[in-house]
Image (cartoon, grey):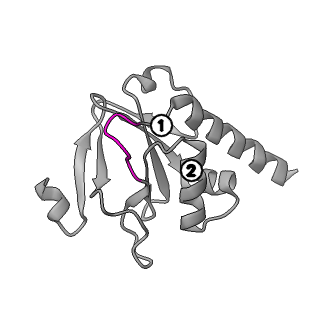
Amino acid sequence: MCEEWGSIAQLALIPLGRNFEAVRIPEDIVHDFVGTDDPPTVSARLAEHLNDGPVIHDPGFSRYYALVPPGTAEFWRVPVAECLTEGTYLGVPRADRIASNGGTRASYWSVPMARPSGLCAAADVLTLVAVAKCQAHEDES
C-alpha cells in the first residue's frame, strides 16, 4: 500500500503521462450532462456513458477527472476540459474510497477503476463534454 493513502487525505500523488492522463472536467459540466448532482446517479450515468472507465470526483475543487490513455493530451483541444499529462501529479484516492463520505470534500472514485488497463476512451469523454455544453446552451435560450 502506498504510504500516502494512509495519510489524512487518503490520496496518493501519481505522475501523469506514462500509464494514464486525466481530463479535468468542471463539476457543472458533468452535472449538466447527467441532469443532477446526486452522487449515485452521477456515478451510474458516468459509468454507463464512459463504459466503466475510471473517474475521480474532487468535490473540494468541484472537478471530475476522467482517466484516459497516455497520448490523449497531444490531440486534446477542448478548452473547457483540460487534459493533464506529463509534469502533472494527480491526487488519486484509495481504491476503497468509492462514495462521497458524508458531505466531506474529500476526493473519491465516482467510477472505480475496474482493471489497471481499463481507461476512459477519449472520444467518450469528448462526447460527454460536447453534449453537456450543448445542453447548457439550449437551457440558456
Q: Residue furthest right?
A: 141
What residue does disc 1 label? 120
Q: Magenta residues, as a range?
A: 112-118
Name which residue type carries label 1. Cys
On whether residue 16 falls in the magenta region, the answer is no
Name which residue type carries label 2. Leu
Q: Quadrant of residue 125?
A: top right
Q: Quadrant of residue 61?
A: bottom left
What residue does disc 2 label? 46
- At x 58% / y 59%, what residue is drawn? 42
Q: Nearer the viewer, residue 49 or 27?
A: 49
Label 1, secondary structure: give it.
Answer: loop
Q: Where does residue 1 sit, x and y in percent of width and height?
A: 13, 54
Q: Nearer the viewer, residue 42 or 107?
A: 42
- At x 30% / y 51%, what residue is drawn? 92
- Considering only vertical position in the picture, is 125 above or below 18? below
- Considering only vertical position in the picture, is 90 above or below 100? above
